[in-house]
Image: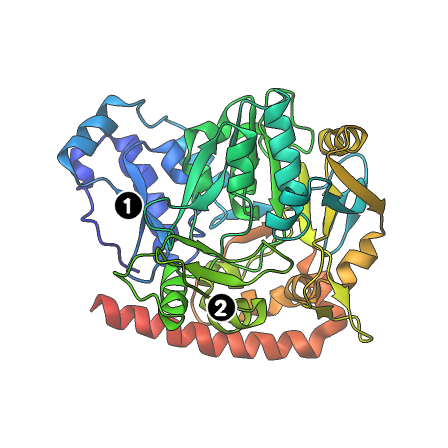
Amino acid sequence: MTTDARPVPTTAIPKETAALRAAVARVVASGNCSGCGACALLDPGLRMRLDDEGNLRPTPVDDAEEQAAAAAAAPVAPDAVKRFEDACPGVTVRAVHPATGRRHPTMGPYLRVWMAWATDTEVRYRGSSGGALTALAAWMLETGQASRMVGAKADETEPRRTVSVSILSREQAVAAAGSRYAPTASAALPEALLPGTVMVGKPCEVSAVRALTTGHSARPGDDDPVLLSFFCAGTPSQHATDRLAAELGSPAGTPVSDLWYRGRGWPGRFTVERPDGTSSDASYDESWGSALGPAAQWRCKICADGVGESADITAADFWRSDERGYPVFADGAGRSALIARTERGYDIIVRAVEAGVISVSPIEMEDLAAVQPLQTTRRSTLAGRLAGATLAGMRVPRYRGFGLLGLALPRFREVVRVARGTFRRARARRAALAGRRS
């Protein structure tokens, strides 16, 4: 895997920095980097930049001014490698087993589960599936329960791109509502670790921040950031967004005034708006199913936690289903499934309901699992993917406490098929990478 930047010679940097960058480089070279950005918090000399494949990857700064700024920042700590290997989703991910509450084999830990939606009609309309996370974060900012929100939004100057930002007001939070199916690195923002932060991030970003702040504890302290996550099917390459926008009449180099993936209706349409007032769009099935989903990076295809286990609160689409139980993507009023994973998360939801911020209706976790076949199938067959990749000579992350072998046994034949397919694809990928390096 390559990057556009030139690496800084390790002989010119302290041994702690050299050791950390070597550890980071191993994860990137293995293809297991998710692009979360946590390593950039541990090394001020790293920046998250798009590589040739359109994925965010940590890259040593190569500009003289940036090098000087990095040198003046706090030095890399002696235990940085240990902290990195404990937090990096490309090295280790731990399942959460709280002392209170229950644990579902594919949906993760929970205290309670609800169907939920924002009571504010604008927030519900702009949100990806009911606007529940936006409503909670905006309310916490507005009432002073949080000092800032860390999340992602469209780049103001180039809306095809997605940027991680620190948001300070309800208005900014609502403006940033809606999923961004593109590379982000919210865990790279220093504000993500600060007291008073409410972070809305992908499961890998949230897992990394949880590890860096509480060491995976299922009982975060009052000063730890509040972590909100969502069900994630993977992070597509930036190239997928660029190609889809081009197919809709906005090729690279042409002006775009706004671009969103979902929201503004449920499930919402991938939409490109141009300065002349014209726009083009594609359905959720066309955009995610045909263009974006197939372009997800390798690490996402071997992910054990697409359900945000490390969050205080996790949201998911609570799809309507057909007679077979499969999701129906027809337009309608958005509704989320909202999972309280920690006692703090439960308290936030209860108080938000009392304040009239969200409306909720209790559901069973099995109801959610039934309309999330991708998440249940992925975790239940993941042992096959990991085995296939390993047999092909690839490194894979260590997944602790997910019970993957136990989930695989009832679907043994399917798991074997998955292993064989992954072996073929992984071997082809290794050959392509080797050819690119030669």
Is residue 44 toward the left or the right of residue 104 in the image? left
Q: Earlier in the sequence, mark 1 or mark 2?
A: 1
User: If the image is split into quadrants, where does the N terminus sit?
Assistant: bottom left
Give residue 426's quadrant in the image: bottom left
Q: Which residue is drawn at 73% across and 45% down?
A: 117
Is residue 169 toward the left or the right of residue 68 in the image? right
Name the one closer to the observer, 69 or 327: 327
Q: Which residue is drawn at 65% across and 51% down?
A: 307
Q: Residues within 10 Å of mark 2 (few under 14, many from 20)?
A: many
Tell which residue pokes out farthest to the left in this image: 64
- On residue 389, the disc is 2
Tell me how many marks there are: 2
Residue 19 position in % (x across, y down) = 31, 38
Q: Mark yes or no: residue 356 visible.
A: yes
Name the one closer to the observer, 169 or 56: 169
Front tag of 1 and 2: 1
In the image, what residue type sits under mark 1? Answer: Thr
Residue 119 position in % (x across, y down) = 73, 40
Q: How crowded is mark 1: few (under 14 residues within 10 Å), some or many (20 or more)?
A: many
Q: Name the residue under label 1.
A: 59
